[in-house]
Amino acid sequence: MTPEVRSDLSKLTGYHSAQVDVDVRLNTNESPFALPAAFTERLGEQMHSLDLNRYPDRDATVLRSGIALLHDVDLGEVFAANGSNEVIQTLLLAFGGPGRTALVFEPTYALHSHISKITGTTVVSAERGGDFDLQADHVAEVAREFDPEVLFLCSPNNPTGGTDDPDVVRAALDSTTGLVVVDEAYGQFADTTALDLRSEPGGDRLVISRTFSKTWALAGVRLGYLVAAPGVVAGCQQVALPYHLSALTQAAGTCALEFVAEMENQVAELVRQRESLWSQMAQLDLELWPSRSNFILFRPTTKGGHDVWQDLVERSVLVRDCSSWDRLDDCLRVTIGTSAENTRFLEALKEIL
Ligand SMILES: *Cc1c(COP(=O)(O)O)cnc(C)c1O
């Protein structure tokens, strides 16, 4: 008989997003754009000079220096890993774990609580407000009550799309003694960042996590990082597996950093597409929430959410079905795609409604 997994894991189901073979895939918030040809060429060139018979640079110094330069911080304030999910896992291995608590505000990115549980960290779930926004006094009250070792914020928040006011982050820092993690996977699509708050009181407990998966159009590479005080980075390095970041990943990330301007252009284009799609969706029978990200959360008001999802699939358009998630009854989330993809989505949606 196969041995059983840890009893505390038996109730956890794996994380997955339904993958269906369709023409228009707007379900996982990836970038719809191909990487610049010059990037692929540069990366190809670099491949030739990699000594793949050797272990990679364990500290990923070149890559981390590039990220440090991008954010105007020190090398010792950057930790990189295989996607920001691994960044979060590493943080929780070092600063969470049995007997420790992580606080999340639902609805939010499911992986924060999921990875917490996998690492044996106790999860406390609090609620977002009516419009899924967070108020500083509410955050302060809950944070004080539980004083978690790790408090998760997500700005812009997945799947609801809004950003957190700087006062929300300040309230979290003022009301806890643990780490405050702001997941900024979609940070470039918004015009606010918690990076600026690192110089304020408690800033040495503030962690900002980012990823190359969304804005950098590199979801397939698996690369994410955090910016935090050197003590936090050292804690992560203490638990990370030796050579966890492959030479290929390090090269891809380093290479990507040469294309900041192209990435920013793509982000600007997606923000334009988002505004245009949002205003067109606002004319349909939908409840929809303002987004500062690369997706829009919406709820059909005349038809069930899951039925609309199914009808979209039949028209070869895939969005994320959030209709069974807590507080998101009948809600769907659409990723901003290319202009042509967004039009296909919109036409299909109009037909269905
Ligand atoms: C997509 C996403 C990530 C990205 O995870 P990676 O492991 O870097 O691909 C992280 N946080 C949030 C909120 C996300 O939506």
Image (spheres, rainbow, N blue to C red):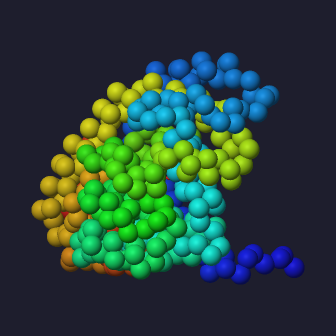
> Vertically, is 296 above or below 103?
above
> Vertically, is 90 above or below 57?
below
Q: Nearer the viewer, residue 171 or 336?
A: 171
**How many discs appear?**
0
Tell me the residue at 34%/27% (across/down): 261
> Vertically, is 127 above or below 258?
below
Tell me the residue at 40%/33% (across/down): 72
Tell me the residue at 65%/36% (across/down): 59
Asked if residue 340 lies left or right of residue 5, the reply is left
Q: Is residue 299 visible?
A: no
Quarter of the image where the C terminus is located: bottom left
Q: Nearer the viewer, residue 103 or 34?
A: 103
Query: How far across and down, in percent of the image, does residue 191 sit?
Result: 25, 46
Q: Nearer the viewer, residue 50 or 169?
A: 169
Residue lying furthest left = 283
Query: How far across and down, in percent of the image, does residue 62 sit?
Result: 58, 28
Tell me the residue at 69%/44% (across/down): 244
Asked if residue 100 lies left or right of residue 103, the reply is right
The quadrant holding residue 230 is top right
Asked if residue 215 lies left or right of residue 48, the reply is left
Quarter of the image where the N terminus is located: bottom right
The quadrant holding residue 141 is bottom left
Query: How far across and down, in percent of the image, does residue 341 sit?
Result: 31, 47
Query: How far across and down, in percent of the image, does residue 337 sit?
Result: 33, 47
